[in-house]
Amino acid sequence: MSIKNVQNTHINLRLRQLHGALLEIVGVMNRPQRDEAMVREAGISLDRALFPLLVLVERLGPIGIVELADRVGRDHTTVSRQIAKLESLGLVVRQESASDRRVRAVVVTKSGKVMTDRVDEARERIGQAVFATWDNQDFEDLVRLMRKFADDIKGHTSPDSEAIG
Amino acid sequence: MSIKNVQNTHINLRLRQLHGALLEIVGVMNRPQRDEAMVREAGISLDRALFPLLVLVERLGPIGIVELADRVGRDHTTVSRQIAKLESLGLVVRQESASDRRVRAVVVTKSGKVMTDRVDEARERIGQAVFATWDNQDFEDLVRLMRKFADDIKGHTSPDSEAIG
DNA sequence: TCTCTATATGTGTAATATGCACATATTAAG
DNA sequence: CTTAATATGTGCATATTACACATATAGAGA
């Protein structure tokens, strides 16, 4: 076996480990129970699919429907309807864009912001608990490398490229 | 502002950055287009929701329906039906457990393994491309810290604890 | 052992979510 | 100024999902 093959074997081992960790993390992030617990804490009734959208709008808004749909991996018509629901609940508004009058950019309302703020606070509490036992350098490295990883996979998966599984 | 508050502010900044990166990564992982591309490459027609299950069964099998449902955050009745579909396609089988005759543990068949193997190969190719430009130490650190992170959030989110958003 | 509770799985059914076909408005390119 | 591309939205058929409920088995305690 050549040196290059040994290296590849090692990389593939690590890739498999990374994929395993990713599957678990995504699994936890996708649990609807988590969202429901948050919503309950915020004291508002909200459909399961609507909550992740609200968080994204707060993070990325003002943002158009199509870009939002791309982020969550759903058809834009689906997202259009979901945003309409969020708007009827008073949590977001669609505002006309001056530069491009086709887009109706979505932003959170004051009421929606109150809700995402509570979510942020809960997330902070959990995060502080999770990382309380971490070595500080490890924590800094995790944040830095996750950011880098997120940036890099976007470039390798954007249009028509292959999937990761 | 006390030293402790300064530290908390810094941690919360990092937590927010980490959350942002996580949202993007999970977003990419959740794109149905990725799964569809994989399935197409493997030359089999497979419902969108079935593919992630197949991957999990290959990784974790033999595994029971309830545990599988917990992993993907769906009701066990939903997963039960989806596994039944996978079984009718010959990609997995449900085998009786000797130790506990309630469970019908799911495992991939030879045919299912062929499919996940192709997926693994594609994932390897992508992974090698993504990390080709990475510093080796960074790559090792990412794998190690993601594993640690996955382990730690499981402990902090398992039963009835709060969500991350 | 007997009983009661918890767990694992599965089916019927109704509500929800989703995407495709299609339509409109606006922008950009030639 | 025509044509293609983009952003958004509605109607409708289908797919997905979960709740209520049922069955079988396991485990704990009297």
Image: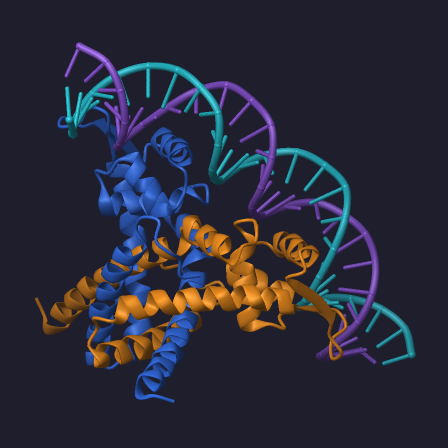
Chain colours: A blue, B orange, C cyan, D purple
Q: Can residue A144 be seen in this view?
A: yes
In this view of the protein, which residue sits in the foreground, A21 or A30? Answer: A21
Please, which residue is most extreme toward the left here? B1
Residue A156, by quadrant, is bottom left
Residue drawn at x 41%, y 74% is A16
In this view of the protein, which residue sits in the foreground, A88 or C20? Answer: C20
Indicate the position of residue B164 as horizontal and vertical percent values: 36, 59
- Relative to B76, say whether A7 is above or below: below
The quadrant in which the N terminus of chain A is found is: bottom left
Does residue A97 appear to the left or right of B160 in the view shown? left
Does residue D1 appear to the left or right of A158 in the view shown? left
- Relative to A31, say whether A51 is above or below: above
- Relative to B5, say whether A79 is above or below: above
Indicate the position of residue B61 as horizontal and vertical percent values: 60, 72
Residue B105, by quadrant, is bottom right
Indicate the position of residue A154 as horizontal and vertical percent values: 27, 56
Residue drawn at x 55%, y 60% is B53
In this view of the protein, which residue sits in the foreground, D20 or B88? Answer: B88
The quadrant in which the C terminus of chain A is found is: bottom left
Q: Total marks drawn?
A: 0
Residue drawn at x 58%, y 60% is B69
Does residue B118 appear to the left or right of A128 in the view shown? right
- Relative to A7, say whether A74 is above or below: above
Residue B148, by quadrant, is bottom left
In this view of the protein, which residue sits in the foreground, A139 or B89? Answer: B89
Indicate the position of residue C1 as horizontal and vertical percent values: 91, 79
Q: Is residue B108 visible?
A: no
Residue drawn at x 38%, y 56% is A162
